[in-house]
Image (spheres, rainbow, N blue to C red):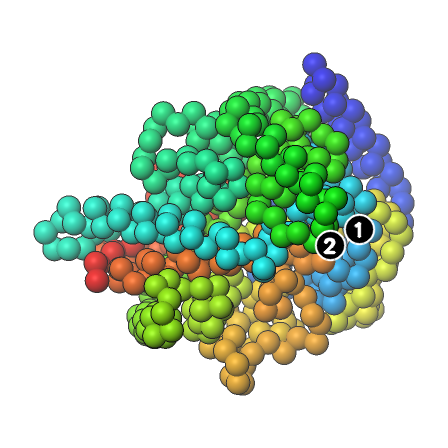
Amino acid sequence: MFLRILLFSVTIFLVIRVLLHHFRRSVISSLPGPTNTSYLAGHFKELLRSEEITDAPLDWSANYGTAFKLHGEMGMKMLCISDPKAIQYVLNTSGYNFPKPLNDRILLTIILGSGILSVEGAHHARQRKILNPAFSSSTLKEFLPIFRQKSTKLVNKLKEEVDRTTAGSNVVDLVPWLSRITLDIIGAASADYDFEALDGVENNKLAQAYNNLLNCMKIAAEVAQEVVDKQTQLYLQGKEGSKDLMSLLAKKTRKHLVTNTSIVHANLSEDPKTKLPMSEVLAQFTYELHLPISAGSNTKFRTFFLAGRETTGSAVVWTLYELSKHFEWQRKVREEIAKTRSQASERGDSELTVADLDSMSQLRAVMKETLRLYPINSFLTRQAGKDDCIPLSYPVPNANGKMLSEIPINRGERVLVSFIAYNRIIWSLKSVWGEDADEWRPERFLEGNGNTTQSQVNLGLVANLATFSSGVRGCIGWRFALLEMQAILIELLENFEFSPPPGNVEIIRGSTGTMAPMVKGSTSGRTQLPITLTSL
């Protein structure tokens, strides 16, 4: 009943906002942009349901530049930006003046609770401050053994599949395997819990509850295209999935967190700079916000599971996809791994350290280039918290042909930040990534190369990429994700050669809430990436 009342209230709010939007003068209305084909869903229909998720934003930016008009649900106009200075202003310079739209926050709160993904302003800053120690560079070394252990297990599982064939090679769909390992890693790193996903355990209730919740999130990604009465059912399904997951998480982690809460309390009184493992930082979060242990910890676990699984897994899958098409880069990275292992052995280390991984320039260039071409989250939306003016690196014309170097925006108007368009060859953004920005070419990220990024705007959390967002709401776990990604790739590349599958298999960037690989023409509608594995 509460959810129905809440959704009814949100619907009334949206109707009022639409009416105010139509009667208030807006500069966004004077900008060119694509024709709106759906009053209810607006251009989210193309953004979320495109067969090739990059087609619409790339076509729009090629035709209208780096700032233009789009339509949201119920005909509301939005400003779409891929301009570096505009993105920097919205995500960095303005701080919390461009929060997530209210409907997005309500959905996230229903499914995730009042966590770092759903709160704004001072509440977000406080949660981030508490959680930062769990993701700092100085604590990453604590996660590396977990990454290595799970990656070795993945290799063994894949070898079992490969060894079933007499030729010593096999076509394997990598998507489910990468989804399993990232789930196991998140469980081990954040809750000391084994989902047993790599073992294929079907009766793990916690894993089942998580997958049910994730499916609800994917459904919710298309909620803008559904009628209001259908939305109620979807939201309720999401809430029930969340309840199942949280009940199991509380049972599995309560005792561990009770112990850690007392440890954190002592640490806070002795030394506020004490470096804490992730599980202890979660206890600190619960303690400082005065939350019940089940409420505080479960909110964080939900966030980590949903934010950390599909994103990293998809990034690894896309990297292997590109390496399967570029044997020269496979060879370079494999040689770099062998050289680094040899150097570690000479100094007496049996395993690679975080510093060793940081020194692998070839592998890191491959990862950065993949993250550029395949941003897992292709866009995000923000809402102006006050009347403001967004500056542009590249002026754009309005409907009358007047060139605008900045765009005034009214309080309540929405901004859609296109990571796909910013990270790719779009209009004048050639000056950022070079003339070959539509190609997968890791050389652009190597030191001394003449075609490294030329942007005069510092943006993003790594390598001028917007893939992990930027500013006060930038991804808190980006270092964790990169190290996890690197550790998995090292183990896989040391043990397998990757090549395209037989036949004419075309892979497209599909939309499932995140950018995921799909086989063009497949009737299954599921994410998949068939690749030939050859044991080394």
Q: Amino acid at mark 1?
A: Tyr
Residue 96 numbered tag: 1
Nearest the viewer among 260 and 220 is: 260
Q: How many marks?
A: 2
Q: Residue at x 64, y 39 (%)?
A: 263
Q: Residue furthest left?
A: 166
Q: Quadrant of residue 229?
A: top right
Q: Which residue is mark 2?
A: 472
Q: Earlier in the sequence, mark 2 or mark 1?
A: 1
Nearest the viewer among 407 and 319 is: 319
Q: Residue furthest top?
A: 1
* Quadrant placement of the C terminus: bottom left
Element type where label 1 sits in the image: loop
The image shows residue 329 at horizontal and vertical percentages of 36, 72
Instruction: Classify mark 2: residues with Cα within 10 Å, few (<14), some (14-19) or many (20+).
Output: some
Question: Compared to 148, does 157 lie above or below?
Answer: above
